[in-house]
């Protein structure tokens, strides 16, 4: 794990144990939250997202703040030359991107050497729930959705090169991937988030 580029290393960014993470967040306008997986290994992080749920070298789950939240508290398409986290095609204005670090080499029927785990999924939902509570984002299908759900709406859902299916399945299945998978999993993630805010 020590051969990662600096921009992909956990220790390059502020990070906390998932179990004790209490975010110190800036105030401002956030309207939506998008969930992802990175399609990389468990320990690499990427600044395309604001918060990554990753696995440290010692096996602990950590939350890594890889991108400045304030940069997406605007219409990013009015000043695209300014930095912002480009996590969901066409949907980055006033929006946070959070991601599980996993799923390198995954296909809908084989999640590969870095599959989703229940602990990572719960970690993502905890991060989503806390961000939604802080920014008063309703945990519903309009305001909190997976990249796969956004891709269904925007017409690029699937597992081909330029398509997206994160997060449309929580477990590998041999049957064909369909848009309803994204919708069902999105609702499962939102249900978990809601439980974490009760």
Image (tube, grey):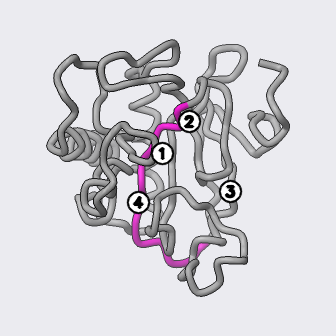
Estimate the x, y position of residue 106 in percent, counting from the top left.
Answer: 44, 23
Whole-number angstrom distance, CA of label 3 to CA of label 4: 20 Å
Magenta segment includes 29: yes
Whole-number angstrom distance, CA of label 4 to CA of label 1: 10 Å
Q: Point out the tag, 3 or 2, that comes first from the N-terminus.
A: 2
Q: Residue furthest front?
A: 161
Rendered residue at 51%/12% (across/down): 113
Along the horizontal axis of the image, is 88 left or right of 15?
left
Rendered residue at 41%/59% (across/down): 132
Residue 184 vs residue 198, the one in the foreground: 184
**Looking at the picture, does residue 164 appear above or below residue 68?**
above
Checking the image for residue 53, the label placed there is: 2
Along the horizontal axis of the image, is 78 left or right of 180?
right
Checking the image for residue 133, the label placed there is: 4
Q: Point out the tag, 2 or 1, that comes first from the N-terminus.
A: 2
Decide if residue 90 is in sight here. Answer: yes
């Amino acid at each position: 794990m020590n051969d990662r580029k600096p921009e992909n290393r956990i220790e390059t960014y502020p990070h906390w144990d998932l179990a004790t993470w209490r975010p110190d967040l800036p105030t401002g306008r956030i309207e939506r939250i998008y969930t992802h997986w990175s399609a990389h290994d468990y320990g690499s992080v990427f600044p395309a997202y604001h918060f990554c749920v990753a696995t440290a070298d010692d096996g602990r789950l950590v939350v890594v703040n890889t991108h400045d939240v304030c940069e997406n508290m605007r219409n990013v398409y009015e000043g695209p030359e300014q930095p912002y986290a480009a996590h969901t095609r066409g949907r980055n204005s006033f929006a946070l991107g959070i991601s599980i670090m996993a799923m390198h080499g995954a296909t809908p029927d084989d999640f590969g050497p870095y599959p989703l785990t229940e602990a990572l999924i719960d970690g993502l939902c905890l991060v989503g729930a806390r961000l939604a509570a802080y920014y008063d984002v309703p945990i519903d299908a309009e305001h909190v959705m997976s990249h796969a759900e956004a891709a269904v709406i925007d017409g690029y859902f699937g597992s081909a090169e330029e398509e997206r299916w994160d997060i449309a399945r929580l477990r590998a299945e041999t049957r064909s991937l369909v848009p309803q998978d994204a919708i069902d999993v999105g609702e499962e993630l939102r249900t978990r988030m809601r439980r974490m805010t009760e």
